[in-house]
Amino acid sequence: MMERRNSIYELKDELELVFPTPEYKTQVEEYLQEFFDNGEYEIAGDGGLDRIKDFDEWLQKVQNDLSEDDIEDNRIPATLYLTIRKSDKKIVGNVQIRRKLNEKLLLYGGHIGDSIRPSERRKGYATEQIRLALLECKELGIDRVLMDCDKNNIGSAKSIIRNGGIFENEVLIDNELVQRYWISLKKRYAYKHVKEKAHNITYKMQPITSNEFNGDICYYVFKDIVDKVIVPNGECVLDDNYKWIEFYDYDSKIKLTAIYDQNNKIIEWYFDIARKIGKENSFPYEDDLYLDVLVTPTGKISLLDEDELKMAYDRFEVSKDDYNMAYNEANKLIERLKNNKEKLEKFTYKYLKDFQNK
């Protein structure tokens, strides 16, 4: 009986994504024939290999697809990879990453199209192939990835879900139901998102339930930092013996970070607007929605990163509802913060002293 693999980490380092080159010609031709022999004449994410059939012509198209200047019919630039098993250099799958969405891909197709050859299925390769593709998406600056699959393709759906896919809806395409999933690459987890910033970090987490807060508060003290961090307004927000306190309120869409220097002097309060505040595997997280609100010690309030939200909206990575929600949350927060700096200061300082006294 074949061993089932459930974790997306069990195959880590077993596969790699490589750009197709002439040396793969024989392998690609055998790969294509295996699908045909299995009665499959459409291969998801193959860059047209199932239609073109000629390797050299297909390879030229794959190279042309990299550039918006060379692409045909107003298509989207895309990068195609062969998924290679390192142990024997065999092609086990293919994946195509579209660098942005248009209205057609938003409905059907998404950012990633992928396939695993028939003889290599049910080995966990689809899940690992998607994981590797998501790393490439992150490098390309794609923050929210759309994937889809036929409703009856349960294996494909499981592979997407194991990589963080959240089901949005079903659409009818050519009389077939297609399921659409979004994968956020903007999730930031407590501790994990700061662990590379210093060689020595004191980390504490405390659950709090009160009339003003319901969630977890995380406390960090940074020592032997990797690099000092200076933000655009000139303030240093990370240095040795700086303290950060993060407030993850699960009833809210706002994460607050209070930053204190080595002398417990407040540097700034930074509010992230989030699609969701949640908790996974004991770690609180925020699914960031670009907009931020900054409050300085003088009480000055600034709305930040509107350009990033607009760019994500234009790339179809943020829906109209989420776009409006981000602004609604930010505007409500700004109104609450007006003339309330002292209250904010007392609130965060209380928890600073609580953590220091433990």
Image (cartoon, grey):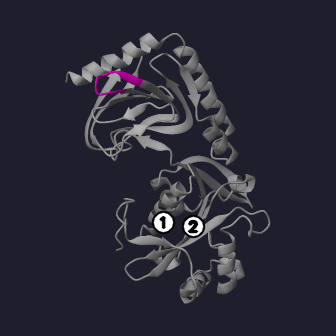
Q: Residue 224's x, y, as percent? A: 26, 42
Q: Residue at x 52, y 51 (%)?
A: 165
Q: Residue at x 51, y 62 (%)?
A: 133
Q: Quadrant of the N terminus?
A: bottom left
Q: Residue at x 33, y 27 (%)?
A: 261
Q: Which residue is mark 2?
A: 114
- Prevailing secondary structure of the magenta residues: loop
Q: Is residue 94 visible?
A: yes
In the image, residue 264 lies in the stretch drawn in magenta:
yes
Badge 1 density bin: few <14, some 14–19, many ≥20, Cα 10 Å: many
Amino acid tagged 1: Gln
Quarter where residue 350 is shown: top left
Question: Which badge, 2 or 1, comes first in the chain's sequence?
Answer: 2
In the image, residue 326 lies in the stretch drawn in magenta:
no
Q: Residue at x 37, y 40 (%)?
A: 228
Tell me, for residue 129, which label it has, or none.
1
Q: Residue 264's x, y, as percent? A: 30, 22
Amino acid tagged 2: Asp
Is the C-beta separation of discs 2 and 1 under 8 Å? yes
Q: Is residue 143 left or right of residue 246?
A: right
